[in-house]
Amino acid sequence: PSLKDVFADDFLLGSALLVNEIQDSNGPDAQLLQKHFNSLTAGNELKWDATEPQEGQFDFTRADKIVDFASANGMASRGHTLIWHSQTPNWVFYDAEGKLASKELLFARMKKHIDTVVGRYKGKIYAWDVVNEVLEPGDKQPGGLRNSLWYQIAGEEFIEKAFLYAHEADPNAKLFINDYNTNMPEKRQNLYDLIKRLKAKGIPVDGVGHQTHIGIEYPTVQEIDDQFQAFRDLGIEQQVTELDMSVYTNDSDAYETFPLELQLKQAKRYKEIFEVFKKHADQLTAVIFWGKDDLNTWLRTFPVTRNNWPLLFDERLQAKYAYWAIVDPS
Ligand code: XIL
């Protein structure tokens, strides 16, 4: 069965990919994407370092391939990401003298970037992660905001401007604030409060994106339920934007092969988590995996290089127990 059909009444079912996976648009990787998913996210190709590596020099060749592949196959495209502290070229934050850019210069660059990128895909990309990972309670800034260069130069206003510019560039795109560990109480509260402040100022925030990079043990299923429950009264959309399940709990663990016991445990956990997703389907509009198969996963190099099996299809694109647990949960 096709995943997207199984969940057709609930939410979009998506995958991230890198452009090399669709080099051959009729190859096995492309076919797997076509069969199972109705929303695609470029894994790296829409990030600032890919689209505008030098000031004013835009390159959309790789992003275009992904967006064109999606539309040729009747799939939606999700945009990831406009403003982030990572995978952003250094020139963005410095002036001609090499000093930290002024707020005015930073906002001018931000506007140009967002206008150009969002404008190019107007009507083609249905939702944007406007800002990504702007919270880091450990940085001890007011509101739990991450002490990034964006924040150091412009304070919280950089978030407001990003949403305003994105909305101007495509008034119909759904605009998301995206983050990880949204199950953790302090960060979750920071995120909730931030969205409230933005909404009170009339900033067009349409949704909250939960990355949902989880482990085999934590967070608990209840904590994942709470991660959606906590935002319900904001009345905005929610999406699971980067789902994967590492088979480890510690950075120091590493397996040669995937133990059967863990294969079954992963399947059970995926099943339970999808029950939670379905429960919130009135607000949860998309569930997107951060990759389709265990070969094409960032978790084989992050946080360390090791084998990992976080997704629904194995290295040979065969369906895993986790896949069957989701499509046939009986
Ligand atoms: C990851 C990509 O998958 C990797 O290829 C890249 O080297 C680093 O970024 N949270 C995010 C994503 O928002 O953009 C990250 O993607 C994974 C964590």
Image: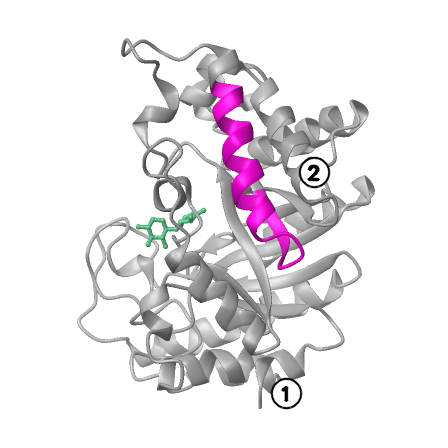
Q: Is mark 2 within 8 Å of ligand 1?
A: no
Which badge, 1 or 2, comes first in the chain's sequence?
Answer: 2
Q: Residue at x 64, y 32 (%)?
A: 165
Residue lying at the far bottom of the rendered structure: 1
Q: Residue at x 40, y 13 (%)?
A: 101
Q: Position of residue 257 (x, y in %)?
A: 22, 75
Q: Residue at x 32, y 58 (%)?
A: 298
**Does residue 266 appear in the picture of this structure?**
yes
Figure quadrant of residue 276: bottom right
Q: Position of residue 223 (x, y in %)?
A: 60, 50
**Quadrant the C terminus occupies:** bottom right
Front-most of residues 153 and 209:
153
Which label belongs to residue 167? 2
Distance from disc 1 to disc 2, alpha carbons, whole Å, reads 43 Å
Q: Residues within 10 Å of mark 1 (few under 14, many from 20)?
A: few
Magenta-tinted stretch: 106-129
Front-most of residues 172 and 207:
172
User: Majority secondary structure of the magenta segment?
Assistant: helix
Q: Position of residue 132 (x, y in %)?
A: 51, 39
- Give the secondary structure at mark 2: helix
Side of 285 relative to 30 (left or right): right
Q: Is residue 56 above or below residue 23?
A: above
Q: Residues within 10 Å of mark 2 (few under 14, many from 20)?
A: many
Which label belongs to residue 330? 1
Q: Is residue 235 above or below residue 143?
A: below
Q: Amino acid at mark 2?
A: His
Figure quadrant of residue 23: bottom left
Side of 301 relative to 193 (left or right): left
Side of 300 relative to 212 (left or right): left
**Does residue 180 appear in the picture of this structure?**
no
**Quadrant the N terminus occupies:** bottom right
